[in-house]
Image: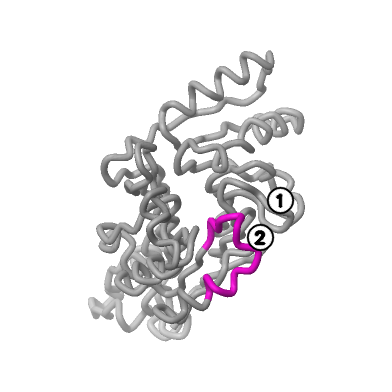
């Protein structure tokens, strides 16, 4: 039962030979969610064996080119592959105007529908929800450009049945769903068997927060508190803190401070400036504050196991 992030691109505006612009795929129970779509995203999906045809939801943080320049190509490729399933895109409303214009200019006729969902960017907003997952956006600080972070959270599962106790108390199949939902069992003689005897606590839910691009922003800490995985941009090192502030980006040290204050499980730093060929300095700087930090390297996967304890 996967909950796994694959890094498709870890660089900022200028790609390098080793690092593509920002894009990630989150696999939740074999459902695939694309987060940002920088140039070359579909190449990276093929390279790292992401099933493109199973991408039905795309979340775009903001409209800078290194986060959207791969989108029109991906939409075109979907069409060439004969896609017929709706594609949902969650982004600032201006993106719909851009994509519609590009499709019209290219005289593209799609056999599937693109459904745009606007992100307002001024407050926390529920974007997507089903029986097992919710996705919220929350505002970041990236100058005049509206920018959103994303919080992916599994929903609580039903309680786990204990087969040995079900057999011992002769619990019929028709009663088991209600017991999963928390009900006690009453046998034919009126004896009440408590739910705690028949079930175990369900596995803990898992969560992932995506924060790029943004200046150092402590106010997001309550929103992303205690997530299992936090991706936070670390464009610069602390020696460049003035430049980071001026460009509304963060340093590795600042990303680590956010992770520490939010008490997250693991910090993943990325969105590196192309000026840095070697990233050991970023990792060292972050680890000094938050030891459980890793680099967002292209192709790297980060998983959260299902806790069955």
The residue that appears at 28% across and 46% down in the rendered structure is: 124
The residue that appears at 42% across and 86% down in the rendered structure is: 168
Q: Mark on residue 293? A: none
Q: Pointer 2: residues within 10 angstroms few (<14), some, or many (20+)? A: many
| Location of mark 2 (residue) | 298
Q: Quadrant of the N terminus?
A: bottom right
Q: Mark 1 and mark 2 in contact (Cβ < 8 Å)?
A: yes
Q: Position of residue 115 (x, y in %)?
A: 50, 28
| Location of mark 1 (residue) | 44
Q: Which element carries disc 1, helix, strand or loop? A: helix
Q: Is residue 110 above or below residue 294?
A: above
Sequence-first disc among 2 and 1: 1
Label the magenta part by its dominant secondary structure.
loop
Q: Which element carries disc 2, helix, strand or loop? A: loop
The residue that appears at 31% across and 69% down in the rendered structure is: 262
Q: Nearer the viewer, residue 73 or 284?
A: 284
Viewed as shown, does residue 183 lie left or right of 175?
A: left
Q: Quadrant of the C terminus?
A: bottom left
The part of the chain drawn in magenta is 270-283
Query: In the figure, residue 211 lies in which quadrant?
Result: bottom left
Q: Nearer the viewer, residue 67 or 252?
A: 252
């Amino acid at each position: 039962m996967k909950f796994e992030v694959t890094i498709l691109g870890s660089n900022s505006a200028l790609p390098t030979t080793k690092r593509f612009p920002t894009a990630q795929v989150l696999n939740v129970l074999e459902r695939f969610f694309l987060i940002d779509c920088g140039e070359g995203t579909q190449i990276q999906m093929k390279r790292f064996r992401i099933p493109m045809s199973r991408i039905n939801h795309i979340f775009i943080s903001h409209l800078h080119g290194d986060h959207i320049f791969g989108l029109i190509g991906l939409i075109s490729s979907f069409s060439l592959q004969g896609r017929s399933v709706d594609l949902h895109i969650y982004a600032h409303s201006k993106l719909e105007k851009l994509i519609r214009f590009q499709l019209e200019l290219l005289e593209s006729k799609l056999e599937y529908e693109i459904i745009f969902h606007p992100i307002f960017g001024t407050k926390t907003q529920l974007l997507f929800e089903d029986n097992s997952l919710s996705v919220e956006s929350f505002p970041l600080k990236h100058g005049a450009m509206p920018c959103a972070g994303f919080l992916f959270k599994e929903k609580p599962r039903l309680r786990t049945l204990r087969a040995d106790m079900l057999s011992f108390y002769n619990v019929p199949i028709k009663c088991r769903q209600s017991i999963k939902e928390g009900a006690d069992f009453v046998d034919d003689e009126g004896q009440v068997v408590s739910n705690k005897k028949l079930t175990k606590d369900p596995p803990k839910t898992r969560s992932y927060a995506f924060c790029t691009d943004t200046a150092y922003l402590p106010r997001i800490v309550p929103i992303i508190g205690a997530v299992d995985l936090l991706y936070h941009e670390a464009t610069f090192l602390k020696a460049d803190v003035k430049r980071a502030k001026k460009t509304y980006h963060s340093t590795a040290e600042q990303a680590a401070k956010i992770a520490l204050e939010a008490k997250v499980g693991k910090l993943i730093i990325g969105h590196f400036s192309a000026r840095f060929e070697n990233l050991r300095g970023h990792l060292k700087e972050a680890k000094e504050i938050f030891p459980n930090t890793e680099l967002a390297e292209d192709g790297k996967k980060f998983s959260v196991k299902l806790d069955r304890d």
